[in-house]
Image: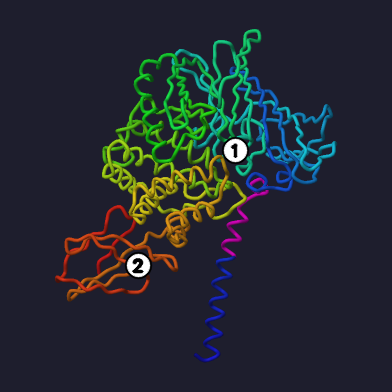
């Protein structure tokens, strides 16, 4: 190659890289300062570790308003004097105090910077109380466009609930609104009109009658993520059962609207069935100390920790529909199974950054077919998860492109594509019991922790004894579907992978010449001798790939 041609090639490569870098930079510039304050571990967050919250609020349903305070207890990790607390307008942070002293607050959009007066000694345990009030953002299309849902039941009673995943818990209460730091325990005190009940996370400690109102005090003993905290207010009635689980007796409580009590007693039988199947696949329920609750709400549902919300209209499937189109999706109530599955993946194992939200949604979407596997067998579960492939859009990668700005990846494919990715991984392991033990060990290893994608990838590579680097690069970080390209001529099969990332070499099971065989394709052509001329080749349907015959 002559010098001039080499120089031309180098200039073209540099130009291409420069254009890509400019595109990425331009995309990054779409994020605002508020995105960074919300999505990053700022200096005003990193110096203190959450230990305890006491959220103490009063609701006025007629005015759709909240007034109250949050006492934030924390451990000092390093010297600093400014603390970031998050609260979204139109709510107002009105005051902050420490040790009886009023503190200065600098307001910057959703972030509020509190200057502390007292020395913050490393290792010390201190607390700040923040006061707030106002009318919070009303949910437009909960839970996707969340906030507070202010509804009425069929009898004209207030029916109120919160939902705030992605949007942030600071849409209705002041807190350290980032996923990386979960509070160790929490007391939630909510004052409501006497004829209503408030159901929140954890266990009910006491009910206080105050004039024509009642305050419900719920205590959460386990670590809890911000968006998992909820309040649900309505004319509820309760029924319960005790489940004999892996860690002993588990209290399972159900709170439903008064008119729905009898149908709920029948329909909620899916809840103990869920618990049995998921303790089999994932290990013990992570929140025995806080119990398990299903709480009826005026929206579809959400995975609030130990207070799973339900609004699937007492129908099987997803509002009576089968997301897989196979019939198997009508064997269970989608919201009970899916949202409760999040107790293991989202509430116990939690992503540190929302860009890694696939950890929540892919494993939980995959749990749906494991529920079917437990009760109806392996083929039924395969039918279901493969049926959901029709919902995959491959619009963008499952993982968010940027970290530190509160931005997720594909909102659709982290469910269906993620579930099929994990189903494909199960095939590579070739040992269902080993796969079950890996899922159980994963829930022990990362029990009550916030994690990154890299931690999950490294764990699965180690436990499967397979280097899954390119596997995850392919399915998580691109929209490419691996395609087995092949041709059959003169008793010879030629095959290779196309539409793949560099280094992708996943083996695949096929049926050819009436035998199940493994192929080991790479980007370059490989050849396999055959016994017969031009036999059909059938790719095992359990692999999420395409096939193209030349």
Give the structural element (helix, strand or loop) at label 1.
loop
**Neighbourhood count class around disc 2 (C-alpha, 10 Å): few under 14, some 14–19, many 20 upward:** many
Numbered marks: total: 2
Magenta segment boundaries in residue numbering: 22-36
Image x and y of residue 436, in percent: 39, 45
Along the line of sight, which residue is nearer the eye, 429 or 219?
429
Question: Which corner quadrant holds the C terminus?
Answer: bottom left
Residue at image mark 1? 168
Is residue 432 rendered magenta in the image? no
Q: Please give the label number shown on residue 377.
A: none
Answer with the quarter of the image where residue 448 lies.
Answer: top right
Q: Is residue 513 above or below residue 341?
A: below
In front: label 1 or label 2? 2
Sequence-wise, the earlier of marks 1 and 2 is 1
* Dot 1 and dot 2 residues touching (CB under 8 Å): no
Residue tagged 2: 497
């Amino acid at each position: 190659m002559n010098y001039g041609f080499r120089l031309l090639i180098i200039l073209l490569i540099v130009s291409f890289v420069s254009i890509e870098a400019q595109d990425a930079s331009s995309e990054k510039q779409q994020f605002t300062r508020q995105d960074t304050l919300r999505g990053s571990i700022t200096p005003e967050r990193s110096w203190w570790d959450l230990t305890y919250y006491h959220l103490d609020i009063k609701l006025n349903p007629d005015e759709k308003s909240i007034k109250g305070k949050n006492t934030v207890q924390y451990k000092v990790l390093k010297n600093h004097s400014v603390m970031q607390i998050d609260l979204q307008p139109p709510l107002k942070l009105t005051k902050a105090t420490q040790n009886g002293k009023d503190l200065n607050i600098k307001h910057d959009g959703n972030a509020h910077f509190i200057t502390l007066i007292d020395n913050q000694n490393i290792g010390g345990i201190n607390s700040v109380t923040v006061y707030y009030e106002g009318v919070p953002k009303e949910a437009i299309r909960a839970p996707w466009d969340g906030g507070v849902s202010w509804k009425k039941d069929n009898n004209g009673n207030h029916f109120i609930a919160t939902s705030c995943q992605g949007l942030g818990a600071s849409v209705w209460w002041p807190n350290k609104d980032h996923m990386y730091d979960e509070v160790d325990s929490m007391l939630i005190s909510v004052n409501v009109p006497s004829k209503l009940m408030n159901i929140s996370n954890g266990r009910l400690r006491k009910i206080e009658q105050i004039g024509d109102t009642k305050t419900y005090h719920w205590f959460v003993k386990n670590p809890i993520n911000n968006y998992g905290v909820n309040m649900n207010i309505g004319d509820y009635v309760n029924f319960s059962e005790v489940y004999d689980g892996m860690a002993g007796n588990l209290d399972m409580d159900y709170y439903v609207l008064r008119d729905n009590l009898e149908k709920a007693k029948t329909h909620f039988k899916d809840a103990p069935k869920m618990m049995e199947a998921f303790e089999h696949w994932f290990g013990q329920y992570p929140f025995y100390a806080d119990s398990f609750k299903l709480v009826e709400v005026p929206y579809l549902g959400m995975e609030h920790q130990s207070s799973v919300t339900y609004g699937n209209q007492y129908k099987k499937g997803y509002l009576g529909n089968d997301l897989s189109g196979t019939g198997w999706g009508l064997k269970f109530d989608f919201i009970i199974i899916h949202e409760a599955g999040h107790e293991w993946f989202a509430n116990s194992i939690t992503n540190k950054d929302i860009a890694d939200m696939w950890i929540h949604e892919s494993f939980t979407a995959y749990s749906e077919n494991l529920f079917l596997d437990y009760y109806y067998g392996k083929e039924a579960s395969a039918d279901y998860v493969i049926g959901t492939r029709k919902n995959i859009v491959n619009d963008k990668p499952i993982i968010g492109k940027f970290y530190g700005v509160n931005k997720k990846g594909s909102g659709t494919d982290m469910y269906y594509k993620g579930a099929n990715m994990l189903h494909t991984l199960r095939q590579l392991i070739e040992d269902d019991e080993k796969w079950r033990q890996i899922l159980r060990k994963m829930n022990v290893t990362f029990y009550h922790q916030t994690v990154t994608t890299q931690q999950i990838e490294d764990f699965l590579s180690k436990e499967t004894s397979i280097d899954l680097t390119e596997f995850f690069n392919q399915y998580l970080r691109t929209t490419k579907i691996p395609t087995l390209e092949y041709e059959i001529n003169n008793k010879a099969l030629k095959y290779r992978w196309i539409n793949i990332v560099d280094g992708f070499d996943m083996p695949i099971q096929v049926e050819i010449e009436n035998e199940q065989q493994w192929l080991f394709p790479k980007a370059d052509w490989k050849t396999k001798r055959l016994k017969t001329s031009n036999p059909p080749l059938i790719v095992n349907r359990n692999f999420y790939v395409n096939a193209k015959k030349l």
